[in-house]
């Protein structure tokens, strides 16, 4: 029986074609019938700043594997730490090795060097919702300087400026 990957959200045709071709490779001997591969790329960042997405996917009772790009490693680390339903998180550059060899949960965890905090995730969510530094400062009762510091920390961990994220 041929195995077809389930990818969510399913609007990345290149990821779907790539995974389908990798699964047809003679070196791939894994079945992914009960796995949801999550397109955890920067283009989908607005989906991953709160727990609605994980609650939605948990209803499927399928294992969850995050496929993240270089900008999303810190966010992948955050969700891997807080959700037991996520079984693996792999960088897009490692997906061939993931599908081609035996793997264990610990080996395929992100490096752990970059991790977002809950406060940084909240700040990111508020920025993506269109709030200004002043709005966030007022809403969270933080000094504006602290918001700028958290914004800088986010930009450093994600490897991309907030202005660029907001244009995605």
Image: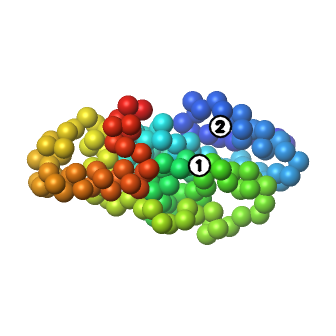
Please report the residue visible at 64 percent of the width from the left and 68 percent of the height from the top: 107
- Kindly state the secondary structure of the residue where label 1 is placed: strand
Q: Measuring from the top left, give residue 150's x and y in whole percent.
A: 27, 55
Q: In this view, does 116 lie to the left or right of 31?
A: left
How many marks overall?
2
Q: Is residue 155 left or right of residue 61?
A: left
Q: Residue furthest bottom?
A: 106
Q: Measuring from the top left, give residue 146's x and y in whole percent.
A: 19, 57
Q: Is residue 96 left or right of residue 109?
A: right
Q: Can residue 123 be seen in this view?
A: yes
- Kindly state the secondary structure of the residue where label 2 is placed: helix
Q: Can residue 60 be seen in this view?
A: no
Task: Using the rendered view, name the quadrant where residue 97 is placed.
Answer: bottom right
| Camera-side residue of 138 and 82 | 138
- Find residue 55 and name its label: none
* Disc 1 target residue: 67
Q: Which residue lies furthest to the right in this view?
A: 26
Give neighbour class at mark 1: few <14, some 14-19, many 20+ (Cα, 10 Å): many
Q: Measuring from the top left, give residue 29's x and y in whole percent.
A: 83, 53
* Disc 2 target residue: 15
Q: Do the residues labelled 2 and 1 touch (CB within 8 Å)?
A: yes
Please report the residue visible at 68 percent of the width from the left and 67 percent of the height from the top: 104
């Amino acid at each position: 029986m041929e195995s077809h990957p389930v990818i969510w959200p399913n609007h990345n045709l290149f990821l779907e074609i790539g995974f389908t071709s990798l699964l047809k490779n003679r070196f791939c001997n894994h079945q992914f019938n009960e796995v949801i591969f999550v397109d955890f790329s920067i283009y989908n960042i607005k989906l991953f700043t709160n727990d609605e997405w994980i609650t939605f996917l948990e209803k499927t009772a399928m294992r969850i594997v995050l496929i993240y790009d270089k900008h999303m490693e810190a966010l992948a680390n955050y969700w891997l730490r807080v959700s037991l339903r996520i079984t693996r998180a792999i960088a897009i550059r490692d997906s061939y090795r993931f599908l081609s060899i035996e793997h264990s949960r610990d080996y395929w965890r992100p490096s752990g060097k970059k991790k977002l905090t809950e406060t940084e995730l909240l700040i990111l969510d508020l920025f993506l919702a269109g709030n200004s530094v002043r709005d966030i400062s007022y809403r969270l009762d933080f000094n504006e300087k602290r918001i700028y510091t958290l914004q800088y920390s986010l930009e450093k961990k994600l490897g991309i400026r907030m202005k660029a994220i907001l244009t995605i």
